[in-house]
Image: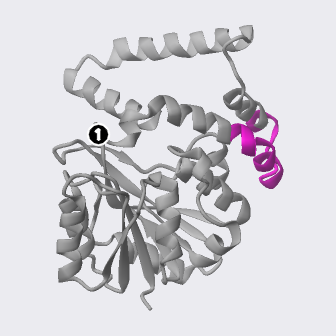
Amino acid sequence: MPRVSIVLPCYNGSRYLRYSLDSILIQDFTDWELIFVNDCSTDDTLKIATEYANKDARIRIINNETNQKLPASLNIGFSAATGDYLTWTSDDNIAKPNWLSVMVEYLDRNQDTDMVVAGMDYIDEDGNVFDTFNYKRRAQDLSYFCNVGAAFMYRRRIMDKIGGYDTSVFCAEDYDYWCRIAMSGRIDYISDNIYQYRFNSDALTAKEQPRIQQKTLAIQRKYRDDFIRHFNMGYWSRVKLSYLSMDRIWRPEYIILDTYKFLSRQLVNILFFWSKKYRKSVFRKIQIRL
């Protein structure tokens, strides 16, 4: 039985798939299994995955009979997982060689921790790093935005406790899952930069921004009161959370505040973002974090 189970759900991901699989094969922690869930791809995804599975017995392939979308594919993959430590990755992202070892070592040392989250780089379609995702974070801040990123590992016991990914929140299933873990267990954040998240124009993150924002708002509303009670939030935290989770379009006070925020951002842009290269970097970062 491997200690770590990695799930890689994939739909038409042949463009970058080899980079993702190669990065897993060179991990300095070797006691893992990779469960590749092919979600009815029509490109060379299955051909590439089969090639790697034939070379390494730690790779297993599950072919969905119908297209299930990401959350259902994750549930299918994790239902076949045997490891005590669980994580998942994407076909266009790259794991650094110490991706698994850093998180396994942390969970081994901290038995009360249910999930560990690490830092990562943002890379463009050509693999160039243009930003990092690594700052001081807290589990309760999940009530405001998804602060987990793509480098994480959690224990089987927390999965058994909270269940699978919610298929009704497609495009924000990860955010919903982290919120549930935060209120049912313990999430720790570490500073190690062990992963590379690719800004890919063909990815769901780029194509489904309106749906992502809609689902994110619904999740914030769904868990708002639970977060307030669980983390015993103070007055200003409750105000901030209420502001984020309310429909602000028809509230005059929120229109004024949103206008102030918009004008402040434009002033900063005028003063500091003259460099074309820097403006491009900031624009990419904003697109990803919306």
Q: Is residue 38 above or below residue 62?
A: above
- Mark 1 Cα shell of 10 Å, populated few (<14), some (14-19), many (≥20): few
Point out residue 259 in the picture as x, y percentages from the top left corner: 58, 10
SS at mark 1 in the image: loop
Instruction: State which quadrant residue 246 falls in.
Output: top right
Most frequent secondary structure within the magenta stretch: helix
Residue found at the far front of this picture: 65
Residue found at the far bottom of this picture: 1
Q: Is residue 176 magenta?
A: no
> Which residue is identified by label 1?
202
Point out residue 73 in the picture as x, y percentages from the top left corner: 46, 60
Q: Is residue 235 above or below residue 36?
A: above
Q: Nearer the viewer, residue 239 or 52?
A: 52
Provide the residue span drawn in magenta.
220-237
Point out residue 118 in the picture as x, y percentages from the top left corner: 44, 61
Residue drawn where x is 51% and y is 33% of the image: 211
Q: Is residue 26 visible?
A: no
Residue drawn where x is 72% and y is 64% of the image: 184
Point out residue 61 in the picture as x, y percentages from the top left corner: 33, 73
**Please, what is the three-letter code of the amino acid marked with disc 1?**
Asp
Q: Is residue 290 above or below residue 115?
A: above
- Would you say 121 lies left or right of 184 here? left
Residue drawn where x is 41% and y is 63% of the image: 64
Position of the N terminus by quadrant: bottom left
Residue drawn where x is 22% and y is 21% of the image: 275
Q: Is residue 88 visible?
A: yes
Instruction: State which quadrant residue 8 falls in.
Output: bottom left
